[in-house]
Image: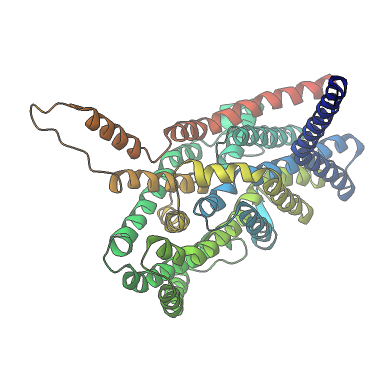
Amino acid sequence: MSNRQVRQSNRYINDLRRVDYQHGEVKKLFSGLLPFVLAALFLCFVGIYGSLVLNAANENMVMLVAAATIGGYMALNIGANDVANNMGPAVGGRVLTVLGAVAIAAVCESAGAILAGGDVVQTVAKGIIQPGDGVTPNEFRNLMLSALFAAALWINLATYLNAPVSTTHSIVGGVMGAGIAAAGFGLVNWVTMSKIAASWVISPVFGGCVAAALLFFIHARIMNVEDRKSAARTWVPVLIGLMASAFAAYMATKGLKKIWRPSAIEIIIYSAGTFVAFWLMSIPYIAKRAAAGDSRKKSINALFNLPLIIGVALLSFAHGANDVANAVGPLAAIVSTFESESIEAKVVIPLWVMMIGAIGLALGLLLFGPKLINTVGEKITKLNAPRAYCVALASAITVLIATTLGLPVSSTHIAIGAIFGIGFLREFVENPSKKRLKPGHRINSTALEAFQNVNIRLRRKLVRRRFVLSIGAAWIITVPASAVLAALIFYLLQFLVSAA
């Protein structure tokens, strides 16, 4: 082959490589843009559907379309951010794949919102403001629209920064900020706000302590004994019964509270009966699974897989029943003012509004949720099935304890606090014991000792500190950030209305 032919052949090869590279870049671009295109199509559909469902006057049509679209945008962000707190531990524990977690969460969250979300919701996000105090219906619409948009923007930013934040706190901050902008500081219920601020500390500390206590029990009674299989046959059914009992009470007090309100005595009876039933049913199941495996920790860990999957599914159902309704509350409030000029503290949620919340949540989870699921499940600390089980059970138990004591808590803060609690307990229990230096003993007296000490220090960091700082900062500034955004949006809306 001549030099000319060689050069021509090389030119063809380079051209082919260039075409392949360009094709790959185009494919990458479209795959990266596809979620945003689908989200945009959903929002367009929501705006059009909202305008067709409600026959509003022409001058109110822009407000209605904007409210429906922003409500859909809020639902997308809830799915992308808030749902990861329930499903992340199961993914991190290698019990579910990301796709499996997304599928289960999408079904359970939507079912919770539609079947148990209730038909009445507070328009003012947990009583933060008192509607009607010097606020006209037009100002109230602008207030709620500003709160909804500000909360959605903040959750979107938090998702981009890999920070799981509370949906309820975002809405609360938005309503507070827009309320102050509309009628001053006197409109805000500061007693309620102080309770919500207290939950910033109460929720993660409670969740972390309960999860750490459960994991310590599992280590002491099952994992660190000589005969793990025998211990597992004894204690895992008890733990399954405890989880079933806790979730029975959890569903009665939180997940189904809008359609079924049993008394305290009834809840205790149902929980006790559930504990006995699931404890007895799980004994042969665990005995069979334990007999089929060996005494390695990996085999014992697998015994927690099925209880964990059921637990996170129930958590997702309860989350859909509670948080979706709260999130679309401002949208329902705006819709109610088109039907009546009065401003009510509680309004009926139209089915189409709840459907926007449910479908938007599922779509946001499918399109954008895997990113934060991986963060929660794998990047904060290493999880396995028992640790993820402790996180799920701690979430239910902590909500029950807080509800009984009348303490305000956030399900997001509880779940993340439980993960932190698991990680810090592992640092304390599982790592090499700290060496106590005798008088006159030199640190790192030899190269080998220096290497060993470095290894010990590295192994102690089982929780990534940067997530502790970043997530904690996001929690602290959620309410004020949403409040400032909502106030600015409200002033902008008022200016546009006056200019028109």
Would residue 123 be found to the left or right of residue 481 on screen?
right
Residue 78, visible in the rendered structure: no
Q: Residue 364, how many percent across, how many down?
A: 70, 45
**Residue at position x 49%, y 66% from top?**
307
Residue positioned most to the left: 439
User: How many numbered circles are shown?
Assistant: 0
| Residue situated in front as seen by the camera: 477 or 326 | 477
Residue positioned most to the right: 58
| Residue situated in front as seen by the camera: 401 or 5 | 5
Vertical placement of 331 versus 29: above or below? below
Looking at the picture, the colour scheme in use is rainbow
Q: Residue 436, how many percent across, how many down?
A: 15, 36
| Residue situated in front as seen by the camera: 155 or 346 | 155
Vertical placement of 294 versus 68: above or below? below
| Residue situated in front as seen by the camera: 471 or 48 | 471
In the picture, which quadrant includes the N terminus? top right
Residue 319, visible in the rendered structure: yes
**Residue at position x 55%, y 33% from top?**
479
Would residue 487 be found to the left or right of residue 478 on screen?
right
**Residue at position x 75%, y 43% from top?**
72
**Residue 405, image quadrant:** bottom left
